[in-house]
Amino acid sequence: MTKVTPAVIDECAQNLLFKITPEENKTTMNEFDAIITQMSYLGNIPNIDNAEPLTFPVKDVQYVLRDDVPCTPMDVNEELKMAPSRLGNQIRLPKVVG
């Protein structure tokens, strides 16, 4: 495993087209140190290699897939009547992204 160093963080940032400041690099190093420390605690649990991986927190999950039932779509004008705000034949939504 590659050791996480400030140079590795800078290289990864550059590969992802990010520009990070020395302060951000230091913060990222601190976060990686915390994660690696936590992982070392997990690695020290006796017989951890014999444990079955937990892939989903609920044991008996059932997915129910229903058949598509064709139906007649609602009339556009009826749908637009229910919209709180519209612009021509489109529903106007509040801006979500800055």
Image: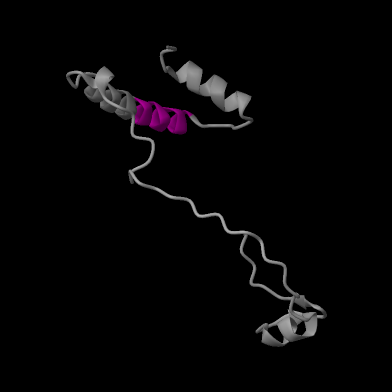
Query: Is residue 90 or residue 70 the one in the foreground?
Result: 70
* In the depicted structure, whether residue 22 falls above or below residue 90: above
Scheme by which the image is coloured = one colour
Rendering coords of residue 12 (x, y %): 55, 23
At x 45%, y 28%, the residue is: 25
Q: For the magenta stretch, what is the residue range? A: 22-32
Given the current orientation, which residue lies at the most extreme right position? 88
Quadrant in the picture for residue 35: top left
Residue 64 placed where, x, y %?
50, 55
87 or 67, which lies in front? 67
Residue 79 highlighted magenta (yes or no): no
Residue positioned most to the left: 46
In the image, 17 versus 67, the foreground residue is 67
Q: Is residue 29 magenta?
A: yes
Residue drawn at x 44%, y 12% as measured from the top left: 2
Residue 98, image quadrant: bottom right
Rendered view: 11 above or below 70: above
Tally the numbered discs.
Answer: 0
The secondary structure that most of the magenta stretch takes on is helix
| Quarter of the view holding residue 14 | top right
Q: Quadrant of the N terminus?
A: top left
Q: Is residue 14 left or right of residue 92?
A: left
Residue drawn at (42%, 18%), measured in percent from left and top? 4
* Residue drawn at the location 60% of the way across and 32% of the way down: 18
Q: Position of residue 46 (x, y in %)?
A: 17, 19
Q: Position of residue 31 (x, y in %)?
A: 36, 31
